[in-house]
Amino acid sequence: AISRPIPLCLMELARERLDPRRMTEAVIQAALFAPDSACDVGYLDFVVEQDILMDKATETAQYLAKLSGQAYAKNKWSLRRTAYEAYDRARSIETRNR
């Protein structure tokens, strides 16, 4: 929609996050999504009404604060390592090709 190719490194982030069945629609065809549909595609985790936004954010933060930070970080790295590495490789390629 912006008449420019998406950088490779950002394409890797889309690959990590978005539903593979919706990638063409979301990335190549530049479809716009309403909030609930954006959850289905993978852009958002959840949607809440504005009047409970701060309560939900506080509840989520309190829950996450109870988790082991070290274990959380290691698990997050393990889960997303492939995407992080693909992002770094794509960024290096783009930097070299400038």
Image: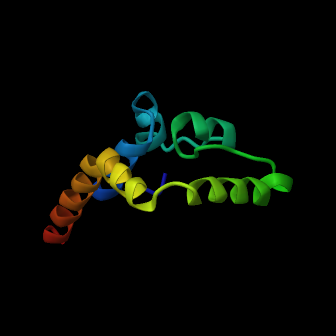
Instruction: Decide if residue 26 is on the left or right side of residue 80.
Output: right
Residue 82 in the image: x percent, y percent?
24, 47
Which of the image's four quarters has the C terminus?
bottom left
The residue shown at (33%, 48%) is: 80
Instruction: Decide if residue 86 is on the left or right side of residue 33.
Output: left
Residue 13 in the image: x percent, y percent?
37, 51
Front-most of 35 and 26?
35
Front-most of 2 and 51?
51
The residue shown at (33%, 54%) is: 74
Front-most of 37 and 86?
86
Which residue occupies the extreme left position in the image?
Answer: 96
Residue 4 in the image: x percent, y percent?
38, 58
Residue 7 in view: no
Which residue occupies the extreme right position in the image?
Answer: 51
The residue shown at (64%, 43%) is: 46
Residue 43 in view: yes
Front-most of 5 and 19?
19
Image label count: 0
> How did the renderer colour the structure?
rainbow
The residue shown at (57%, 33%) is: 40
Residue 67 in the image: x percent, y percent?
52, 54
